[in-house]
Image (spheres, helix red, strand yellow):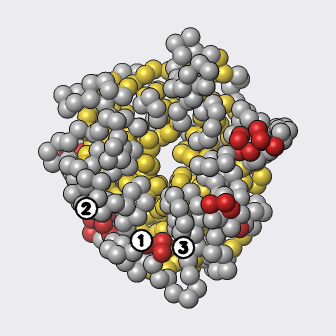
Amino acid sequence: MSATRRQILARTGASVAGIAFTGALSELFAGTAAARGGHAGYGPLVPDPAGLLDLPKGFRYKVLSREGGPLGSEGRVPSNPDGMGAFRGPRGRVLLVRNHENSHSGRAPVPTIGGLTYDPGARGGCTVIELDARNNVLGERVGVAGTAVNCAGGPTPWNTWLTCEENESKAGTNGYTKDHGFIFEVDPVDPRRTGAVPLTAMGRFQHEAIAVDPYSGIVYETEDAFQQPFGLFYRFLPDKPLGGTGSLRAGGELEAMRVPGVPDLSAIQETGAVFEGIEWVPVPDPQARETPIRIQDFGRAGITHAQKLEGCYWGGRSVYFVSSFARASQGSAADHYGQVWKYEPHRRRLTLVVVFGPSTDLQLPGESPDNICLAPSGGLMVCEDGDGGQHVYGLTKHGEVYPMARNAQNIGTPEAPEWGEFAGVTFSPDGGTMYVNCYSPGTTFAVTGPWR
């Protein structure tokens, strides 16, 4: 990103005081324990003597996997771990499906495995970590390989993982032999059941995350476009909704959201702003054969764009999606430091429920919310993606923010320290363990302790 909140405050000498979240935080926790109450954290973070992960007193971590370590008999653990989901496995086990956001020049590629590789010229994909009930690693293997820039994704109601390519390169560019920009399904129990088959009907664009409506089977998708024109918010209407593993291959219709009178969501600054009669417009060419979807002709009324559309999740009877930031200097209608939007399908209504920053303490979240997950103990966990120290923060329904983890791995120098972002925060099926990735150096942690 260009000018971040910390850089702006440093240049202007602006004072900082407290946390600046506006909006109805209780909206974010619909259908969770936090809708009935919340607690504001577990105390200050305690420096880790090992220099890996700082946690509150009483919590502990286990390193499950490190970039470059052994990946069973298949090679080495790939770099750039990103989005992640935790699934219940056989015999009380937990299966972690972990994206690797490797481009054509990624440091450590996902090993190419027969039957699980889409494009041998691509270095991204997913790996699966199998754990016992005590978070001991029983095995680690490839889930899908030969995909590009696997950023986020999301779980399905039938317990598979949809991994998203945040890339729309075509065959013949960057060493790729096939077109990219697709979603792939990964069965954590048996990846060979799903193979390496692109779900082409779900569109070819710079995918970020997905959320499945468990009532209708409609899949919502975010697009993280880096430059103008910015991304769109999509829905996919499958021909075989809620049909189980492989059903999304049956095809369906891809549509993009139009908010009447709002060409750019960043122009909306007031939390609680409500838009009725949301429209869904069929995508002219979901395969983007000649033109990226976001600049295709959607008719005279146009389509609604937003910068940095990232996190997406389902709660209650609504889908929530995140715009990490918007910068007028980069072409957005206005600046903001993060928005969370709520769409209610049964009412065709869109609401801006939360705006982040910028008047926040430099050590607390106020810019660029990225990966987000609902915590079974109540509340929300947010991976901050900005400058300076990198944290996982908890957020209660009352707007109370507390630090949950801090990356202690300095990838800079003692004079100019740097810390890699967190990604892929998720919880075990029983709610007793928080799993999270450190993007660089690639590390996957299991965090346990006195969760409420």
Q: Is residue 277 left or right of residue 436?
A: right
Residue at x-position 46% and y-position 35%: 439
Disc on res. 257: 3
Figure check: 357 above or below 413: below
The quadrant in which residue 332 appears is: bottom right
Which amino acid does the dot numbered 1 rest on? Answer: Pro
Please tell me whether mark 3 or mark 2 is closer to you in this view.
2
* Location of residue 403 in the rendering, given as x and y in whole percent from the top left corner: 67, 30
The quadrant in which residue 383 appears is: top right
Which amino acid does the dot numbered 2 rest on? Answer: Ala
Residue at x-position 51% and y-position 26%: 411
Q: Quadrant of the C terminus?
A: top right
Of callouts 3 and 2, the N-terminal one: 2
Q: How far apart are the two marked residues, 2 and 1, measured between alpha carbons?
A: 15 Å
Residue at x-position 29% and y-position 39%: 109
- Residue 165 visible in the snapshot: yes
Figure check: 223 above or below 123: below
Which amino acid does the dot numbered 3 rest on? Answer: Met
Disc on res. 292: 1
Of callouts 1 and 3, the N-terminal one: 3
Q: How far apart are the two marked residues, 1 and 3, measured between alpha carbons?
A: 16 Å
Q: What element carries label 3?
A: strand
Q: Residue at label 2? A: 171
Disc on res. 167: none
Crowding near pointer 2: few (<14 within 10 Å), some, many (20+)?
some
